[in-house]
Amino acid sequence: MYLGRSNKKVTAKQAAVILVPVLRKAPNVASNCIDTSKLFMNTGIDIEFVRQNYQKMTDEELVRVATQDSTGLTPEAQEVAKKEIQRRKLDRNIIQGIQAQNRSYTIEEIDKYCEIIQKLNCPTCNTSSQILNGTMTVEVVSYVFLTQYKEKIKIGCPDCLDRANNAALTKTVALGWWGIPWGIIRTIQSIIVNLKNKKTNHNDTPNVFLRSFVLSKVGLLETYKDDKEKVQQLISV
């Protein structure tokens, strides 16, 4: 269904690729602005066609698109979506979710969202004794001529993040080597990445993986930032 998009949705892993060099260069500079929209080219759209598509959606579909899949909508398409939300008398915070996915952010602004997450219970052990952060686990499983390389962003307390990286390491060491020719190569890569990522699990400040998760979920976070239960569900996925 065509919604008036001018670019692609940014995933957590893509956001991490964007953030890593920026944060390494100037991690504490507030004027250092992250603007994923600069990665893409705008194109023209048929507004009436877009309006009809939004009108065909159920409330549930409209909320999902507005809060999770509005990155890259042209200003005209955003306006159509906002008017449809208002016409149906849906929660006005949903409109803020659309806007949140189509603007640039300073590191300080990203960290405001990170603070909301860091104060929640760990989605794995359900404790609140440690502030939460993020990590990326990398697993490799090989079947002779087939090698699977799987990356996943995980949010949790430092101890649970360590366990997640360790579990990925154990699985990779046991099952990653056997592929030809990529098994050995990908296994070595996975071991290096998991050990490297563990080093930031115990940071007191948000690390690149938590920040990238925030950027990939910013529409939902802006919409439900005052609803602790909703945000808790978001990080538990």
Image (spheres, rainbow, N blue to C red):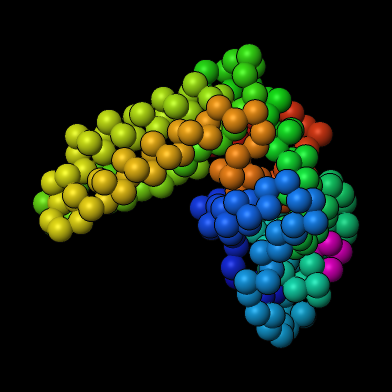
Q: Is residue 216 above or below residue 157?
A: below
Image quarter (top left, top right, bottom left or bottom right) of the N terminus = bottom right
**Residue at x-position 53% and y-position 57%:** 17
What residue occupies the far front of the structure in this picture?
Answer: 25
Q: Position of residue 204 (x, y in %)?
A: 65, 28
In this picture, residue 24 sits left or right of residue 4: left
Q: Position of residue 32 (x, y in %)?
A: 74, 57
Image quarter (top left, top right, bottom left or bottom right) of the C terminus = top right
Q: How many marks?
A: 0
Q: Nearer the viewer, residue 166 or 117?
A: 166
Q: Quadrant of residue 119?
A: top right
Task: Please report the bounds of the magenta region as a residue range.
Answer: 79-83
Q: Is residue 138 above or below residue 13?
A: above
Q: Position of residue 96 (x, y in %)?
A: 83, 52
**Residue at x-position 63% and y-position 75%:** 40
Q: Position of residue 3 (x, y in %)?
A: 67, 70
Q: Please say whether residue 69 is visible from this viewpoint.
A: yes
Q: Please say whether residue 147 is visible from this viewpoint.
A: no
Q: Nearer the viewer, residue 66 or 51?
A: 66
**Residue at x-position 34% and y-position 43%:** 192
Q: Main secondary structure of the magenta part?
A: helix
